[in-house]
Amino acid sequence: DAKTTQPPSMDCAEGRAANLPCNHSTISGNEYVYWYRQIHSQGPQYIIHGLKNNETNEMASLIITEDRKSSTLILPHATLRDTAVYYCIVRVATSGTYKYIFGTGTRLKVLA
Amino acid sequence: DADVTQTPRNRITKTGKRIMLECSQTKGHDRMYWYRQDPGLGLQLIYYSFDVKDINKGEISDGYSVSRQAQAKFSLSLESAIPNQTALYFCATSASGGGNQPQHFGDGTRLSIL
């Protein structure tokens, strides 16, 4: 029931920018887009989130299109340690709070 | 996040046993959550707590109970474990104040019930 769609896998050369796309065409006007990643056997790691303006932090940049139907996560200088599954998430209301639906994500492989 | 610590990391036990999974956090967050992750099914919310005196059921609370002993501690209990509770369990925290605060996850507890 994920509200987002992502390519299943991508490769990126070490040191280059990794651009991970996400479609969220049914997002509502006040919903944020969140990005997490999960490295095997670890918990989901928060990366960044945004509403409509582009965002940047020490890990990544998030570019959201003007119509908010898609976004791109940018890792500016990918390293081998960035190899992980990346999830683009729009929260879903449930039981009085929100839950995160982790879809299939994009498996990013950074190549030496 | 090292700021959200779950213990134990792995547990194998038998049907009918009582099990407690523990979560502690140093992030100073008011809100805490328990999820389970099954292969191909993503995360399902079990219970959540917005402060020490607040406990709320999630989507799949049957067979589970929780205790919020302090702001920093939130434990999950399986009163009488059954094999279909075999899963990866995650604890998460978030700050209060504004509905957009991201959740931060621990590294999980892998629970196997034989």
Image (cartoon, coloured by chain):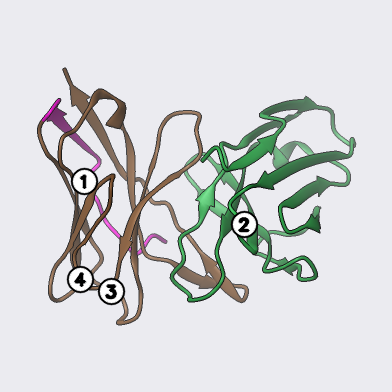
Chain colours: A brown, B green
Q: Are marks 3 and 1 in contact (CB under 8 Å)?
A: no
Q: Which amino acid does label 3 sit on?
A: Thr
Q: Which of marks 3 and 2 is in front?
A: 2
The answer to whether residue B99 is above or below residue B87 is below
Which residue sits furthest top?
A112
Q: Name the residue under label 4.
A: A53
Quadrant in the picture for the C terminus of chain A? top left
Q: Residues within 10 Å of mark 1 (few under 14, many from 20)?
A: some
> Are both tags, 2 and 1, on one chain?
no
Q: Give the residue at mark 2.
A: B28
Q: Is mark 3 on a helix, strand or loop?
A: loop
**A100 with respect to A97 (left or right):** left
Q: Is tag 4's residue or tag 1's residue first in the polypeptide sequence?
A: 1
Quadrant of image for the N terminus of chain A:
bottom left
B77 to the left or right of B95: right
> Separation of disc 4 and disc 1 at Cα?
23 Å
Residue A82 image position (x, y, % from top left): 28, 32
Q: Mark 1 points at which residue?
A: A7
> Circle 3 marks a residue in which chain?
A
* x, y percent for residue A64: 18, 65
Is the C-beta separation of discs 4 and 1 under 8 Å?
no
Which badge, 3 or 1, is on the more N-terminal residue?
1
Q: Which mark is residue A26?
A: 3
Residue at position x 30%, y 74% in the image: A27
**Label 2: chain?**
B
Which element type, helix, strand or loop, lies under badge 1?
Answer: loop
User: Which portion, as a residue range, is magenta?
Assistant: A1-15
Residue type at numbered disc 4: Asn
The amino acid beneath tag 2 is: Gly
**Residue type (three-letter) at the residue carrying disc 1:** Pro
Q: Is residue A86 left or right of residue B31?
A: left
- Separation (CA) of disc 3 from disc 2: 34 Å
